[in-house]
Image (spheres, rainbow, N blue to C red):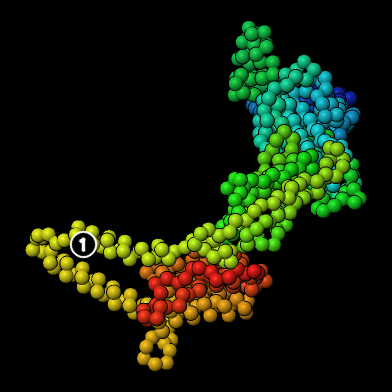
Amino acid sequence: MLNRYHHVFSGMHTAVLGGLKPAQILILLAWLSCSQALAGTLEAQIDRTRITQGETVTLQLSVSDDIQGNPDLSPLDKDFDILSRSEGSRFNIINGHSSATREWQLVLLPKHEGDLTIPAVRLGGMESQPLQLKVMPAAATQSGAAGTTGQPVLVEVEAEPEHPYVQGEVAYRVRILSRVPLNEASLGEPQAGDAIVEQAGEDNHYTTQRNGTTYQVIERRYVIFPQHSGTLRINGPTLAAAVPVRNSGRRSLRERFFGKDPFKDMEKFFGGAPFADFPDIGGLFTETRPVRIRGRDITLNVLPQPAGVQGQWLPAKSLSLAEAWSPDPPVFRVGEPVTRTIALIVDGLSAAQLPDLAPPLPSGMKAYPDQPQNETRAEADSLITTRTLKTALIPTAPGSVTLPEFRIHWWDTEAQQPRVATLPARTFQVLPPRAGTSAATATGAPATAGANAAAPAAASTSSHTDMQALQPKPQPAYWPGIAAAVTAGWLVTLVLWRISSTRGRNGIPRPAPAGDAAPSRRQQLGQCRTRLKNACHSNDPRAAKAALLDWAVLQWPAAPPRDLSALAGRISNAAARGEIIALDRLLYAGDAQQGWDSHAAWPVLEQVLVQKAPTADSGTDEPLPDLYPRHVPGT
């Protein structure tokens, strides 16, 4: 520093120094020392001294010198969160003298209310002065309702009931009230510890009044399911946004941009009303500041499951059962399916909490359920969940059959007492199979002999008519060559089909029995039946599938079904069709041996594989296997 002073004085005229007294020289040195000290001072200022909790304050630090490094901001961490920071430099040239100023701008969010001190910040050997800030409580975040402070943005939260049951529904609502535009707004999720939090429906938008002030409202709803009894603390969500600010003694962006405010005269003309909350027209020059407002925390007392509750624990506002039939009213006949649809409607539970729909089944009745379907919708402050199950019921014997009562126990959270939803028992009369089928079969398969007998005659008539329509007509000279080519192609196709028909489905030739004659179609059908019987008795679902598909190749050689699902579509026997579909599902699931009742399946599948004995004089195979069953399982 002394070297710097020496440099300054060396430029002065010696006559000037010679004219000063020693005391005057000391005063001059002190003045220069103070100027140098001022040049290296770290200055601090804030844009406001009174704010509401949730609002931010801008701290500006500046130093008028070419100082390297950055200020130490760690003292601010005690009472403030630093939301953003920026740095810049300014250069001024006045009367040929240049000066540099570095600036730091910090957006601070107070961590709590009260009289706070923004502590001194150090940069090198410099230190800023402490500043005082008063943070007033925000009524909206402390009580859940807007207060009388005229705040531009409020956050309200509500939760009910205050004493929910474990795994019961808690309706949680968040309302954002604003009388100024919100830019870059985002709302966090409420945090509820050991609980499941789900948003319910879409946001609601409406207008409301708070203490004479009109607010635009965005309401978001949640449902919370506590997983343990005891105290549950729900931490309120945090709203982060940028809001426009008024000119608080500093030059606005309009003044900085234009040198003066070009819209001030317009505001005077309109009385200031149109621009009361929007200091810059259209938002083009609006100065904004970030705000972060956190909803209040809520503590709930979660009640445990009451003692003596039966069945699965289902705390709900309402729970009901309903059923429908197809056909309606239901008509039960041996071997024919009737569809029963059961619906479980619950107010206050999610789909994951609903029980399985497994009504008891009487003897003499088989059931083939579909996959249950779930649907959830938000109504008011709750979830309405519906689980629907469709089941095909197939009676196996005529007479009276009673479907037992179906009951679901649940807990009424509003009345605080146990309740039971019930589908009452229903008794039906099962009709015998339709005419032309044996009453002992329980298959309900329609008679086909008459249709088969009439088929040749119909085919003959159709063939005769078609031949008349296709009598050769005079053709151009080139048509005989085309006809010969088509005929040759058809002959080749016929030969290839004949070769393929002697091979298995995988292209492996079928083994022929000893002797010159190949096995007849009747013998092959008998082999398929034996293979299927052995597969059922040995509980081998894959062997049963192979036997069924080989049988299907013999039945429909021109277009055999390629899988069990396609085979089931060609079976008219409802009971056998159901067994084939069940076998296909179990094989697809990959664990068929543990879920396949092969001993019960064989008597049903046998009915579609049985054969008629050939007549004595025919000596030929039956064109179709006999579909008439000979006995009913279990009779």
Q: Is residue 34 left or right of residue 476?
A: right
What x and y, as percent, mark residue 240? Answer: 72, 35
In the shown orientation, is residue 129 left or right of residue 379? right
Q: Residues within 10 Å of mark 1 (few under 14, many from 20)?
A: few
Which is more toward the observer, 293 or 156? 156
Considering only vertical position in the picture, is 434 above or below 320? Answer: below
621, 56: nearer the viewer: 621
Left or right, 375 with respect to 115, comes to left
In this rendering, position of residue 474 left or right of residue 406:
left
Check the picture and name the quadrant holding the C terminus. bottom right
Residue kind at label 1, given as amino acid type: Met
The residue drawn where x is 90% and y is 48% is 306
Residue named by callout 1: 467
x and y percent of residue 10 in the render? Answer: 75, 33
Choose top left, top right, bottom left or bottom right for residue 421: top right
Which residue lies at the image location 45% right of the left edge and 67% below the top edge? Answer: 561
Can you see residue 633? yes
In the rendered image, residue 434, in percent from the top left (x then y), is placed at: 53, 58
Quadrant assignment, res 248: top right
